[in-house]
Amino acid sequence: MCQACGFADIVHGSKMRRRAFVFGAATAGALTVVGSARAQGRKSPSKETQKSNAPPKPENVMTPDEALARLMEGNRRYQKGIAKRHDFVAEREALVGGQNPYAAILSCADSRIAPEYAFDSSRGDLLVVRVAGNFANPDNIASMEYAVEVLKTPLILVLCHEACGAVKSAISSIQEHTTLPGHLPSLVAALAPAVKAVAGRPGDQLENATMENARLGVETLKTATPLLSAAFNEKRFKIVSGIYRLGDGRVDLFA
C-alpha cells in the first residue's frame, strides 16, 4: 500500500470492501473459482512482497532517543567539516518505493539554514518543512501528522536560528505599529505571540523572541489534536526545539 493511501485511510477511515456477486446457471462453478482464489489469498506472502514491505532504509527504524542522538552526532560532524560519504545512486534506488525518515524538522526558510547539511544527513533521512519564522500552522501540522502517523517518524525538531529576519521584522512591525506590504502581515500575526510573550524580558529581545517562538511551536505540535497529541501521549515520537548558530553551525537544544 502506498504511503499516500495510508494517509487517506487515517482521514477517511477503513477502506471500503468490495463484494462479488455471481449470477446465472454456472453458480456452482463460480463458487469453486471464488473458493480457490480465497485459498490462494491465504498463502504466505512471497519474498518479493516481503521485500517491498520492508523499510527503504532499515537503519532509520529507531527509538526517539536514538533518533535525537543520531541527529546531534550528524551536527557535530557538520561543525567539524567532516561529512559522511553518501552513495546517492544506491539511495535513489532504495527510495523509489517509499520513505522512512528518522526525523522531521520544522525549520525557517532562511537560505543560510539547510537541515540536511546541518545534520550531515542524506535523502530519505529527514522530512523537512520550511517556512519563514518556523512557526506551526495548520499546513505544517498536517505535514508532521503525515510524518508521525504514516511514515512512523520518531522525532520532531523545531529549528530556529540566530538573526532571524522574520522575527526581527515582526518585532519592528509590532513596536512601531506599522503594516508590512504584501502577505508579510500574516508572518507578523503568526510570530506576534512569541514577540509579546518576551516583552520586557532581560536579554537580547530578538533571540528571546526567536527561541520563544520555537517553544510555542513545540507546544502547538505536541498538543495538536487528534493525531499528534495522541501519538505524543503514547510516546510514539519525541519533540524538541533547537537554535542554529550561524557562526559555527552548532545546534543548541533547549526546553
Image (cartoon, rainbow, N blue to C red):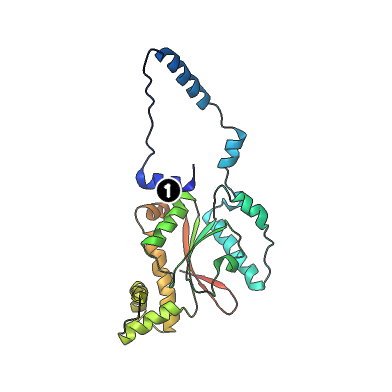
- Under circle 1, the secondary element is helix
Q: Is residue 254 above or below residue 169?
A: above
Residue 91 is situated, as x and y percent measured from the top left of the image, at 63, 54
Q: Residue at x 43, y 76 (%)?
A: 210
Q: Residue at x 36, y 48 (%)?
A: 11
Which residue is at the far left? 177
Residue 239 is situated, as x and y percent measured from the top left of the image, at 46, 61
Q: Is residue 255 left or right of residue 90?
A: left
Residue 143 is situated, as x and y percent measured from the top left of the image, at 43, 58
Report the residue marked by disc 1. 7
- On the question of residue 96 being in view, the answer is yes
Name the quadrant containing residue 250.
bottom right
> From the image, which quarter does the C terminus lie in?
bottom left
Q: Is residue 53 above or below residue 71?
A: above
- On the question of residue 200 being in view, the answer is no
Q: Quick one: 66 or 113, which is closer to the camera?
A: 113
Q: Quick one: 91 or 206, which is closer to the camera?
A: 91
- Give the number of callouts: 1
Which residue is at the far front? 24
Q: Is residue 47 above or below residue 251?
A: above
Q: Disc 1 residue type?
A: Phe
Q: Is residue 168 above or below residue 215?
A: below
Name the quadrant containing residue 131.
bottom left
Residue 191 is situated, as x and y percent measured from the top left of the image, at 37, 74
Q: Residue at x 47, y 58 (%)?
A: 238
Residue count near mark 1 (Cα–Cα under 10 Å), binned few <14, some 14–19, many ≥20: some
Q: Is residue 72 left or right of residue 198?
A: right
